[in-house]
Image: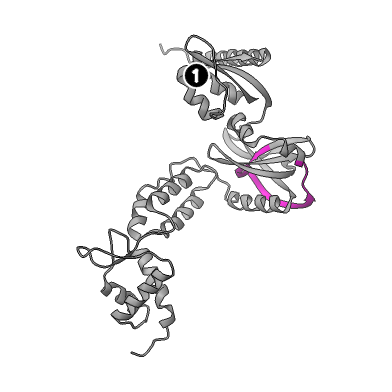
Amino acid sequence: MPRGKNQKLKLLVLLRFLRSESDEQHPVAMKELLAELARAGIQAERKSIYDDLETLRDFGFDIVQATPARRGYFLGEREFELAELKLLVDAVQSSRFLTTGKSRALIGKMESMASRWQAGELRRQVHVADRVKTMNESVYYNIDTVHAAIAGEKRISFLYNEWAIEREGGLRCVRRRRREGRRYQVSPWELIWDNQFYYLVAFDGEAGRIKHYRVDKMERLAVVDKPREGEQAFRDLDLTRYSRSVFGMYGGELRHVCLRFSDALAGAVVDRFGSELTFHDAGGGAFQVTVPVAISPQFFGWMAGFGSKAQILAPEAVAQEYCRWLSETLEAMEGAVLPPET
């Protein structure tokens, strides 16, 4: 049989077809392989297909011949198993730092790594539209720029956004620039994934200390051709402990705080601070731990969520600050309660 002009594409066409159209539950018959080659303008005989499939096996592809009951061939082991792809899809659709559009684009790429039947299963578990997502389309590229700056040991500059209430012309929530639109310039050291957001850990030369910034709040990020600063400050930082201590990645004064919890809250404490803690018996079915914590309203809110089952024991100044926060919160709540309807 004369060789067609597309003959060199034969192995690639077969592999592409097996990737998209076959899996263990859906093997493809020899006649389907021949038909796909014909659609690509490639002439082939059965014997040559057997040789081609063997060549793909020799190259490392898991081309499996189905049982006699099903008959046909399928691509077995892939780069990712279906369960792994489902896990990745869940992670992408729940990632708040990705926009809805970017989430769907990434999930679409994951679907291409499965058969079309498996891709259908992935599609049925996708619920992106009802998730809280960032509006910053540049976040994907911000991460790339930050990695480039870290690798090159350079500083970066950026504009930093926040949400604010604006009342002029009607009440609405708007994005606005922090620092009246002046650019930040910091030395990047690490990216941290915390509570579904990416944070940059960087050294602020003006303040002379480590700070963190949410990557999806950055805009017009650029690498600055200046050597980064703060190497010693970053080396002195226990990054794992830092990320556990800073609640919701809101900054605050880092203090060692002694806390008392009911025994039933052991799981919540380990989830927050890790299992390497030293636990002390506090009596009455309770324990106490000493942990480094960034003192902030977010930390107080976390403690308050446990009600009477959690207390701050020391330092006294932090315990008093927590009591003031609780009192102010209660007063604000009492002032906000609507009178009963008459």
SS assignment at label 1: loop
Q: How is the image coloured?
A: one colour
Can residue 164 be seen here? The reply is: no
The quadrant in which the C terminus is found is top left
Amino acid type for the residue under numbered disc 1: Phe
Between 152 and 109, the one lying in front of the other is: 152
Residue that extends furthest to the front in the rendered view of this protein = 58
Q: How many discs mark residues in the rendered view?
A: 1
Q: Nearer the viewer, residue 305 or 216?
A: 305
Measured as percent of width and height from the top left, residue 110 is found at: 44, 56
Q: Is residue 219 left or right of residue 15?
A: right
Q: Where residue 172 sits: x, y (%)? A: 57, 35
- In x, y percent, where is residue 205? 79, 39
Q: Is residue 219 magenta?
A: yes
In the depicted structure, whether residue 31 falls above or below residue 106: below
Q: Is residue 87 visible?
A: yes
Name the quarter where the N terminus is drawn: bottom left
- Across and down, in percent, residue 150 comes to 69, 50
Q: Quadrant of residue 40?
A: bottom left
In the picture as drawn, the residue positioned furthest to the top comes out as: 284
Magenta range is 212-231
**Prevailing secondary structure class for the magenta stretch in the rendered image:** strand
As for residue 287 lying within the magenta part, the answer is: no
Question: Which residue is under mark 1?
Answer: 306
